[in-house]
Image (cartoon, helix red, strand yellow):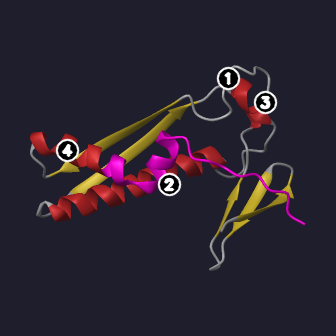
Amino acid sequence: MATARVEEGLRIRVDGPNDESLVTDMPGAVGGGGAAPSPGWFLRAAVAACVTSLAVMRAAQLGIEGFTCEVEVDSESDDRGILGLDASVPGGPISMRIGFRMTPVESSRRQEIADWAVEHCPVSDAVRRAVPVTVELLA
């Protein structure tokens, strides 16, 4: 579980059950101070880290020695969605790009590894498909 609390303004501290923690701040364009990474950056970072891990796992399954992998994740958003200025614009990303650099891998295997990693990554899966969400008011 992750529990978020306001520190100041839109600066948020998130704590986990095993002393994990991170701090986010929204960019100035939407009223934050920009003093820490945004929650959206952490989403992209989570996708990048998870997909990279899965690519390494797949390369090991395929017996590829000396495998190295770098994954970059970028997304496009429209601030009108997060600010509620246009009901037709989603609050989240409109699109996401996952780019891979891998060595030493035959070109014919690169796409296979990339596709497998994205398909099996639980973080990218949560972004790719509609996941049921329950909203509760806690006492």
* Residue that mark 2 sits on: 46
| Residue 98 belongs to the span the image colors magenta | no
Query: For numbered disc 3, what is the local secondary structure?
Result: loop
Earlier-in-chain disc, 2 versus 1: 2
Query: For numbered disc 4, what is the local secondary structure?
Result: helix
What residue is shown at x 62% (from left), y 80% (from top)?
18
Kindly report which numbered mark, 3 or 4, lies closer to the viewer in this rendering: 4
Amino acid identity at mark 2: Ala
What residue is shown at x 27% (from left), y 53% (from top)?
69
Q: Nearer the viewer, residue 119 or 96?
A: 119
Find the distance from the CA under tag 3 to the CA under tag 4. 39 Å
Q: Position of residue 11 (x, y in %)?
A: 78, 53
Q: Which residues are magenta?
A: 117-139
Marks 4 & 1, CB-CB < 8 Å contact: no
What residue is shown at x 12% (from left), y 40% (from top)?
107
* Residue that mark 1 sits on: 89
Kindly report which numbered mark, 4 or 2, lies closer to the viewer in this rendering: 4
Q: Position of residue 99 (x, y in %)?
A: 34, 39
Marks 3 & 4, CB-CB < 8 Å contact: no
What residue is shown at x 76% (from left), y 37% (from top)?
28
Q: Does residue 119 appear left or right of residue 32 in this picture?
A: left
Find the distance from the CA under tag 3 to the CA under tag 2. 24 Å
Earlier-in-chain disc, 4 versus 1: 1
* Residue that mark 3 sits on: 83
| Quadrant location of the N terminus in the rendered image | bottom right
